[in-house]
Image (cartoon, rainbow, N blue to C red):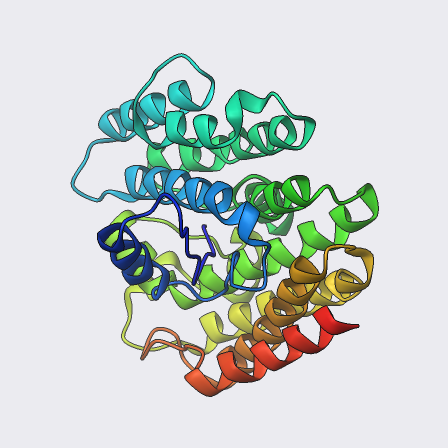
């Protein structure tokens, strides 16, 4: 869920903490925070990353019972809402100065918007009924991430809809990459169930070593949906005033389009379909160009 890479907190984070952060960030597809963002905001974004990562880990722990996962989320949410003084939720609340400034208060509200998706995953056996159900999941699990960044930068309402679309596209791409492991380890299926039925695909096929023809049709249809989301997201850089965030949006759009093309050619059950170092370098150039405009 969290899509953060390459943040440095030069004042508060120790070298050991930064090393841990970087190790986790290398597993992410898309940078939510990078050196393009204003240094003054990086501490807040790192705190948000740690909160989202902690909640994601709690909801996804295959060794824990659903009740234990929910209990861990209770601790995180309690800290975020000021009911507890420990944990990543409380740390985020402190980083946002208890929400006293309007931008920090808005970011706190948006961060809390992540919890329904984490709660759903923690309950076990997530299975999306249709595209609308998947988009509802993404509104919590992904759109809230973009909205936190928009809130911290004081961006207006015009950026919200394309940001939501981009974040939903990123979430679906992540699901497609991980659909085999999500099924085997966590019993989850994010592909729309009605599309599975129409194609004649069964959930058990997600555990196979390669895509069946039926499942390949569902993946292709899902990528068509991603293409539509990215078309909705295309105006986002032009609607962002902050130069760094504008560049970040442009770079992320570039990466999302690239990963979509790779998934159309690849088989995510047979081997991980991922972005390359060259892809990230090209996206960085796209981001720098957009930031400079």
Horizontal and vertical percent for residue 45? 50, 45
Residue at (61% x, 81% y) in the render? 285
Task: Say left or right for 216 vs 134.
Answer: left
Q: Which residue is drawn at 60% across and 30% down?
A: 104
In this view, the residue in front, 209 or 261, is 261
Observer-nearest of 217 and 252:
252
Instruction: From the top left corner, tell me how far across and down residue 235 is, in percent.
Output: 80, 63
For this orientation, the residue located farthest to the top is: 83
Horizontal and vertical percent position of residue 227:
68, 70
Image point (34%, 73%), residue name: 269
Q: Where does the C terminus fall, quadrant-wise?
A: bottom right
Q: In this view, does 209 lie above or below 96?
A: below
Vertical order, 76 against 256 (above or below): above
Q: Quadrant of residue 8?
A: bottom left
Q: Is residue 164 left or right of residue 157?
A: left
The residue lying toward the viewer, choosing from 207 and 9, is 9
Instruction: Determine which quarter of the picture holds residue 87.
Output: top left
Give the residue furthest to the left.
Answer: 63
Residue at 52% across, 57% down? 33
Q: Position of residue 152 (x, y in %)?
A: 63, 41
* Count of numbered circles on the image: 0
Q: Which of 180 and 97 is in front in this view?
A: 97
């Amino acid at each position: 869920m969290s899509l953060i890479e390459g943040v440095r907190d030069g004042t508060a984070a120790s070298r050991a903490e930064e090393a841990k952060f970087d190790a986790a960030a290398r597993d992410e597809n898309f940078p939510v925070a990078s050196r393009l963002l204003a240094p003054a905001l990086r501490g807040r974004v790192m705190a948000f990353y740690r909160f989202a990562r902690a909640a994601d880990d709690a909801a996804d722990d295959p060794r824990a019972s659903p009740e234990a996962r929910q209990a861990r989320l209770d601790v995180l949410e309690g800290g975020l809402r000021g009911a507890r003084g420990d944990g990543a939720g409380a740390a985020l609340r402190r980083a946002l100065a208890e929400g006293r400034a309007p931008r920090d208060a808005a970011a706190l509200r948006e961060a809390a918007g992540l919890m329904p998706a984490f709660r759903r995953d923690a309950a076990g056996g997530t299975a999306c009924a249709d595209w609308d159900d998947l988009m509802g999941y993404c509104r919590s699990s992904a759109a809230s991430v973009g909205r936190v960044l928009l809130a911290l930068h004081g961006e207006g309402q015009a950026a919200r809809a394309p940001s939501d679309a981009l974040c939903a596209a990123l979430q679906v791409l992540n699901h497609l990459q991980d659909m085999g492991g999500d099924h085997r380890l966590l019993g989850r299926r994010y592909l729309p169930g009605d599309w599975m039925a129409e194609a004649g695909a069964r959930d058990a096929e997600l555990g196979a070593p390669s895509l069946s023809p039926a499942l390949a049709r569902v993946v292709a249809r899902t990528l068509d949906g991603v293409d539509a989301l990215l078309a909705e997201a295309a105006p986002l850089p032009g609607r962002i005033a902050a130069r760094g965030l504008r560049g970040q949006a442009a770079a992320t759009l570039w990466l999302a389009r690239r990963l979509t093309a790779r998934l159309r050619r690849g088989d995510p059950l047979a081997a991980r379909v991922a972005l390359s170092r060259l892809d990230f370098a090209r996206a960085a150039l796209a981001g720098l160009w957009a930031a400079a405009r």
